[in-house]
């Protein structure tokens, strides 16, 4: 409903395209607000890890410590925190 209320047809965007942004934002906000229901990241490095880890380890079954260190370095997150999230 936020998208419908804030939509301005004169800006040239379709309502659907405009609404997709608001729907995604509301879903992310809901997840972050309800962290007790779903284990999520609350700090910026943890959010970066949470949203990028799945795509980075698609082709890997189990990460070796070296691979885990490389991914943590690529994402710019603390390795012990990364290892904790990876093993959860």
Image (cartoon, rainbow, N blue to C red):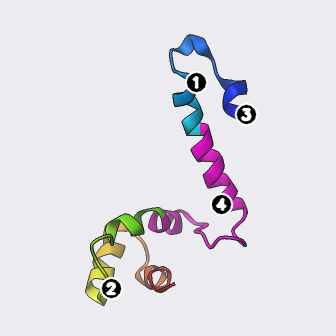
Residue at the (66%, 31%) spot, across then down: 3
Q: Is residue 69 left or right of residue 49?
A: left
**Relative to 46, is 63 on the left or the right?**
left
Expressed as whole percent of the image width and height from the top left, the position of residue 32 reads 66, 61
Q: Mark 4 packing: few (<14 Cα in 10 Å), some, or many (20+)?
A: some
C-alpha span from label 3 to label 1: 11 Å
23 falls in the magenta region: yes
In front: label 3 or label 4: 3
Where is residue 86? Give x, y as percent: 44, 81
Q: Give the mark, 3 or 4, whose residue is nearer the N terminus.
A: 3
Question: Can you identify the residue that label 3 sits on?
Answer: 1
Disc with the residue nearer the chain's start (2 vs 4): 4
**The N terminus appears in which quarter of the rendering?**
top right
Residue 62 - label? 2
- Circle 3 sits in a helix, a strand or a loop, which is it? loop
Q: Which residue is mark 4?
A: 31
What is the secondary structure assignment of the residue under circle 2?
A: loop
Mark 3, other Cα within 10 Å: few <14 / some 14–19 / many ≥20: few
Question: Which secondary structure is most common in the magenta stretch?
Answer: helix
Q: Work out how far the residue at label 1 is from the one at label 2, CA to CA, in angstroms.
A: 43 Å
Q: Which residues are magenta?
A: 22-50
């Amino acid at each position: 409903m936020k998208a419908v209320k804030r939509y301005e047809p004169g800006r040239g965007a379709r309502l659907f395209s405009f609404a997709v942004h608001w729907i995604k934002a509301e879903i992310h906000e809901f997840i972050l607000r309800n962290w007790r229901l779903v284990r999520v990241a609350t700090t910026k490095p943890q959010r970066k890890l949470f949203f990028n880890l799945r795509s980075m380890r698609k082709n890997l079954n189990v990460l070796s410590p070296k691979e885990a260190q490389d991914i943590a370095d690529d994402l710019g997150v603390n390795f012990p925190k990364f290892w904790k999230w990876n093993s959860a």
